[in-house]
Amino acid sequence: PDISNANLITVARRADALGYHSFWTGESWGRDVFTVLTMVACHTQSLRLGTGIATVFSRTPALLAQSIASLDSISEGRAILGLGTSGRIVIENWHGLPFKKPIARTREYIEIIRQALAGGPVNHQGEFFKLARFRMNARPVQQRLPIYLATLGPKNLELTGQVADGWLPTWVDRNQLSGLKEQIAKSASKAGRDIADITVAPYLFCYSADTSEEMEEGRMCVRSHFAYYVGGMGEYYHGLVARSGYSAEADAIRDAWAAGDRGKAAAAVSDAMLENICILGSRDECRAKLDNFRSAGVDMPIIVFPHGSTLPAILRTLEALAPDA
């Protein structure tokens, strides 16, 4: 929400010129993903366009299929559908819908979306949706449009291994990546699939700094953004951070946030969390840390700019981590 459309286009164009693979955006309660990605598609040439994420509660599977097929057509085959459940706070408080059976709902969405994108009639009798003779007239350019899932819990990871083309974990500790990836690999194997066919694409806070002042600014931005998620977004992210080995930090962040002390909540984000979950430092330090994530099993790291990052900081980080730099 703190970047204008003009600056967003500037970032996308620069990423396109630097050889980045894809541009991802979420929505929560901000701008919707498909409108933003259509705007980006119209201002870029090669950059793929990922919904990161579109929630399976706020749209029907038929509409999601129509929307991603339209984006794929407009972008001439550059769309990626990232799906997730979002969280109870967003779904119930913003969309006014009950947050029930998210895993089963996600599975059914993917079944319907795959059928619809294939172009044949969709006759589906499921737990959540019953469709008869639905057929899309608009076909995507890609023969198999990639579907990624944003998951972390054991049953969600199992679903990812069974049906997804990619995995979008959020704020995952580098030291735990291999174990989580192994869970997906086992599920994929049982389903007759290979983990090599599932792109591991975690969201990583990234901030490159040339001076000590910029580095301190980056730490403040990341700590504040982390505190917002852990303290202000319900139990999901608190539980995620606690399970990653930072239970004391997670409790301290939550308690300070609940007391209204945002500064104390941000200060409770430890150096270890910054080191193992984020990428901060000079250009060379950031590239080395990115390599460490790749060595831990990451195929396609997704750079996330923490809330409060200025346009110069975003562009500086893009330059520092550019694929061809």
Image (cartoon, rainbow, N blue to C red):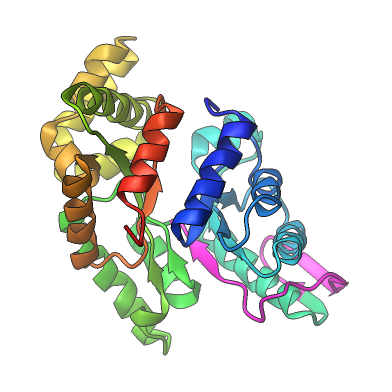
Residue in the picture at 18% in, 48% down: 284
Q: Quadrant of the C terminus?
A: bottom left
In which quarter of the view is residue 126 placed? bottom right
In magenta, the rendered stretch is 124-150
In which quarter of the view is residue 120 placed? bottom right
Task: Say whether residue 27 is visible.
Answer: no
* 51 magenta-colored: no
Q: Position of residue 5 (x, y in %)?
A: 63, 33
Vertically, is 117 above or below 268? below
Q: Nearer the viewer, residue 125 or 55?
A: 55
Residue in the picture at 41% in, 80% down: 197
* 143 magenta-colored: yes
Q: Position of residue 129 (x, y in %)?
A: 73, 63
Tally of numbered discs: 0
Q: Quadrant of the N terminus?
A: top right
Vertically, is 41 above or below 254? below
Secondary structure mostly seen in magenta is loop
